[in-house]
Image (cartoon, grey):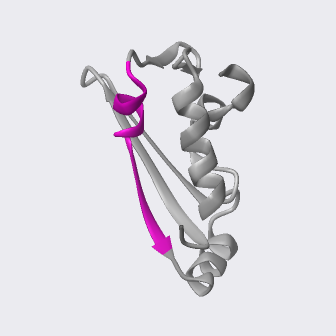
C-alpha cells in the first residue's frame, strides 16, 4: 500500500442530496479503516440535522469511495491548502470505520 492516499467519498440519497468528502490518509490507516468497516454490522451513519445513510451491505458502502496514491510533495500541498484534510474534509464518515462498532 502506498505511503499517502487521497480518499474521496461520494454518495447520493434519492436525488435529494449529495454528500462528498475527502481525507488524506496513510496507506495502512486506509487499509485498517476498510477492515474495520467489514467488521461493522451497523452501517448506519447520521449527520447534519436529519440526514442519514444506512447500508445493508458493507461492499455497497465501500463502493462510495475511491482512492488515489499521492506523493509526499502532493500530500504537503494538500495539508497546507485544505485545513482538516488529514482528519476528513467535507462530510467524511469516519465513525463508520470505528473498530469499537464491530
Is 60 included in the stretch rendered in magenta? yes
Q: Quadrant of residue 16?
A: top left
Quarter containing the C terminus: top right
The x, y position of residue 84, in whole percent, is 70, 56
In magenta, the rendered stretch is 57-69
In this rendering, the answer to whether 91 lies above or below 24 is above
The residue positioned farthest toward the left in the image shown: 15
In this rendering, the answer to whether 26 lies above or below 41 is below
Q: Determine whether, in the image, residue 14 is placed left or right of residue 21.
A: left
The x, y position of residue 87, in whole percent, is 70, 51
The x, y position of residue 81, in whole percent, is 63, 72
In this rendering, the answer to whether 68 lies above or below 94 is below
Residue at left offset 24%, top offset 25%: 15
Q: Quadrant of residue 92?
A: top right
Residue at left offset 68%, top offset 59%: 86
Residue 98 visible, this orientation? yes
Is 53 included in the stretch rendered in magenta? no
Residue 26 visible, this orientation? no
Residue at left offset 54%, top offset 42%: 34
Residue placed most toward the observer, 82 or 36: 36
Q: Quadrant of residue 14?
A: top left
Q: Determine whether, in the image, residue 54 is placed left or right of residue 82.
A: left
Number of numbered labels in the structure image: 0
In this rendering, the answer to whether 46 lies above or below 22 is above
The residue positioned farthest toward the bottom in the image shown: 73
Residue at left offset 51%, top offset 76%: 70
Amino acid at each position: 500500500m502506498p505511503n499517502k492516499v487521497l480518499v474521496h467519498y461520494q454518495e447520493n440519497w434519492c436525488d435529494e442530496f449529495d454528500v462528498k468528502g475527502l481525507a488524506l490518509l496513510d496507506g495502512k490507516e486506509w487499509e485498517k479503516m476498510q477492515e474495520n468497516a467489514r467488521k461493522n454490522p451497523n452501517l448506519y451513519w447520521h449527520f447534519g440535522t436529519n440526514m442519514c445513510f444506512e447500508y445493508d451491505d458493507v461492499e455497497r458502502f465501500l463502493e462510495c469511495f475511491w482512492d488515489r496514491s499521492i506523493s509526499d510533495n502532493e500530500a504537503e500541498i494538500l495539508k497546507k491548502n485544505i485545513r482538516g484534510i488529514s482528519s476528513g474534509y467535507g462530510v467524511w464518515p469516519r465513525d463508520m470505520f470505528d473498530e469499537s462498532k464491530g
